[in-house]
Amino acid sequence: MNWDDTAPSTAEESAGAPADRLVAADADGEENAVEAALRPKDLDEFVGQERVREQLDLVLKAALARGATADHVLLSGAPGLGKTTLSMIIAAEMGAPIRITSGPAIQHAGDLAAILSSLQEGEVLFLDEIHRMSRPAEEMLYMAMEDFRVDVIVGKGPGATAIPLELPPFTLVGATTRAGLLPPPLRDRFGFTGHMEFYAPAELQRVIHRSAGLLDVAIEPEGAAEIAGRSRGTPRIANRLLRRVRDYAQVKADGVITREVAAQALGVYEVDGRGLDRLDRAVLTALLKLFGGGPVGLSTLAVAVGEERETVEEVAEPFLVREGLLARTPRGRIATPAAWAHLGLVPPQQAGGGGQHGLFEA
C-alpha cells in the first residue's frame, strides 16, 4: 500500500539484479503506474510507521495553523516502505502541488536552479535518492533550503558574476536509502527527519486487506497472513505478491485467496515461507552444500552461484543477514544454524572449536 523510489536508483538495480525478481523492493515505471491506484491519499489511510506518522501529522498541522510552509522533511529507509507515498501525502495535506525528481537526474547546479526557479509558493519538491545528487547542486541546495535563494553564475572566468535569484517558500522532501551518505550540512537543514522501519506481519496484513479491497479480490485472513509472512516486511512486495496470488486464484481456484491458495501460488513463483526466492536459496544452498557452511570468500560464493559478485553482495545478502541466515565475517561468509534448519540440512560435525560451531556456541 505504501511505496517509494520512482527513479531506478536502488542497490539492486545498480548491482544488476534479475529484472523479474518478485521479491525485489524496487519498482520500475510500469509497476509504479499499476500501484498508483493503491496508494493511500492521507495520513489516516497510511498503514504502519506509527511514530513517523504521528510526528509528521504534528508538523503539518502546525504549519497549516500558522499559514506557513511546512519544514523540509527527510525520509530514510529501505526501498518500498512508503517514502514517495508520504511525500505525496505531505503535498495533499498541505493542499500544495508536488514536483518529483531524483538525485541522479540532477548532475549540474543548473539543473537544480531550473527546477527551483519554476516552483510555486508552497509547492512540495520531492527529491528521491537525494544522496546521489552532484556536489555542485548539493551546495546550491544549502542556500535554497535555508534562505530560499540561489546564486546563478553568469559568464566564465574572472568576468563571471553571481546573480541572486529569490525563490518562493517551498517544502523539500528528500528521500534516501543511505542516510549515512548525506553530508551533515545537508542533514542539518531538514526540520524533520523520519526513519522508515520494516513492517510487522500484522501491519502487512492490514496493507494486503486494504489493497485486496481496492483490487476487488476476495481474501481470507489466513490467506493475507500467508502473503504477509513472505513479504520481507515491505508493503511494495506484499502488494506485488498479492497481485500474483490473485492471478493464480482466478485461474487455478475459485478466485478466493485462502491460505492454501496463497501457499500454492507463491510456491509456483518460488517464494518460500520466509520470503526467500530462487537467488536467496541458491546462495544458501551453495554455502551449505559446497562449502560446508563456510567460511567462504564472496567471489568464490558468487562463482558457485553463477552470479556477479555485486549481485550476491548487494541483492541477496542483505535480506539473508537480516533474517539471521548468513553472517559476514572477516574470514568470509558463514551460514548460521538457522540456515541449516531452514533448508532442512544437518550441519557437518566440526573438528575442534575453530569452525562454524565455535562462532555460534559461545
Image (tube, rainbow, N blue to C red):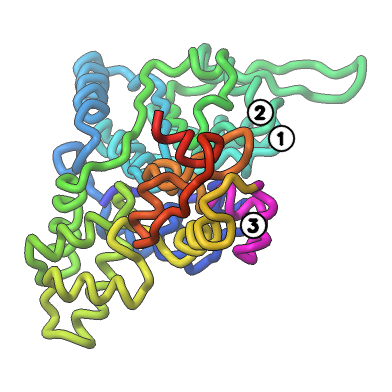
State the CA–CA distance, disc 2 to disc 1: 6 Å
Task: Tell me if residue 205 is in the magenta stretch.
Answer: no
Q: On the image, numbered disc 1 is attached to which residue? A: 108
Q: How many labels does the image show?
A: 3
Residue 340: give x, y in percent of width and height. 39, 54
Q: Residue furthest left?
A: 220
Q: Residues within 10 Å of mark 3 (few under 14, many from 20)?
A: some
User: How far across and down, in percent of the image, does residue 36 sit?
Assistant: 32, 57
Secondary structure mainly formed by the magenta segment: helix
| Left or right: 132 as drawn, with respect to 54 | right
Looking at the image, is 12 positioned above or below residue 114?
below
Q: State how far apart marks 3 and 1 are (Cα).
A: 37 Å
Q: How far apart are marks 2 and 3 (CA)?
A: 37 Å
| Chain part drawn in magenta | 297-315
Is label 2 in contact with label 1 (beta carbons under 8 Å)? yes
Q: Mark 3 points at which residue?
A: 302
